[in-house]
Image (cartoon, rainbow, N blue to C red):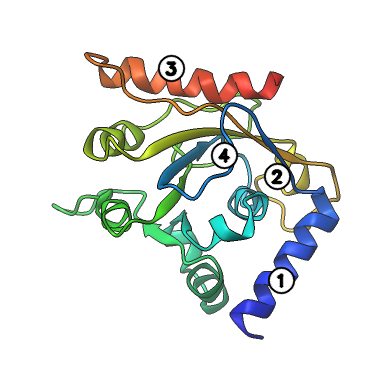
Amino acid sequence: MSAKVMSWFLLALVRLLTGAQARWYGCPPKAEQRIYFANHQSHADLVMIWAALPRELRSITRPIAAKDYWTASPFKRWITTAVFNAVYVERERKGDEDPLQPLIDALTNGDSIILFPEGTRGHTGEPQAFKAGLYNLAQRFPDVVLVPAWINNIQRLLPKGEVIPVPVLCSVTFGAPVRVEEGEDRKLFLERARRVVMSLAEV
């Protein structure tokens, strides 16, 4: 199966199982360089946001994928590289390597990215504390637009530990962009960004 056929299959499957509704509040879909950052409760999150973006944005937006999980088999590696053009990231620092370097390279090349600042999937309703990567990237790329997103109900589709999806209605709500305010330190920004994501659950 070619990557293009797989892309169509996944889009059809996600829309059949979830409806894949995209709700834009505070900003429209736009072909500008962005970091989309969202809550993370399921392996399907990556596919859900990717499917919610308009076609013209999918082609310029790369999801971040945990390297240890998404390269564990030839199929996972193929689907993340050939279909999603994902950026692999190490979840644990190795030696002097900067785990953010692949994301920095993607943003330097002009790509948009989909980031899950919690770093790993949670299993409660609220996102875990955000890790420093979002703040560090925002500082390094101040002209890249930071768009918060809330993925609703996806944990019921494919919760942690499950492999068989269950059809449920899901949506992705995109909110108004945020930025690091002058003098705002890392801790304050990350907590504010987390609250912004959580607030979209009520929209």
Q: Mark 3 and mark 4: span between their CA atoms?
A: 17 Å
Please give the residue where the numbered disc 4 appears in the rendered image: 40
Bin the neighbour count of mark 2 within 10 Å (Cα to Cα): few under 14, some 14-19, many 20 and up.
many
Residue denoted by label 3: 192
Question: Between disc 4 and disc 2, whose residue precedes?
Answer: 4
Q: Which mark is residue 8?
A: 1
Identity, as a three-letter code, of the amino acid under mark 4: His
Counting residues from the N terminus, which is met first, the one under dot 2 or under dot 1?
Answer: 1
Mark 4, Cα crowd under 10 Å, few <14 / some 14-19 / many 20+, is many
Counting from the top left corner in percent of width and height, residue 157 is at 77, 47
The reply to whether discs 3 and 4 touch (Cβ–Cβ < 8 Å) is no
Asked if residue 25 lies left or right of residue 65, the reply is: right
Residue 120, horizontal then vertical, whole percent: 49, 42
The kind of residue tagged 2 is Pro
**Quadrant of the image occupied by residue 129:** top left
Classify residue 180 by image quadrant: top left
Check disc 1 and give the amino acid type. Answer: Trp
Is 114 situated left or right of 52 in this image?
Answer: left
Quadrant location of the N terminus in the rendered image: bottom right
* Element at label 2: loop
Which one is closest to the eye, mark 4 or mark 1? Answer: 1
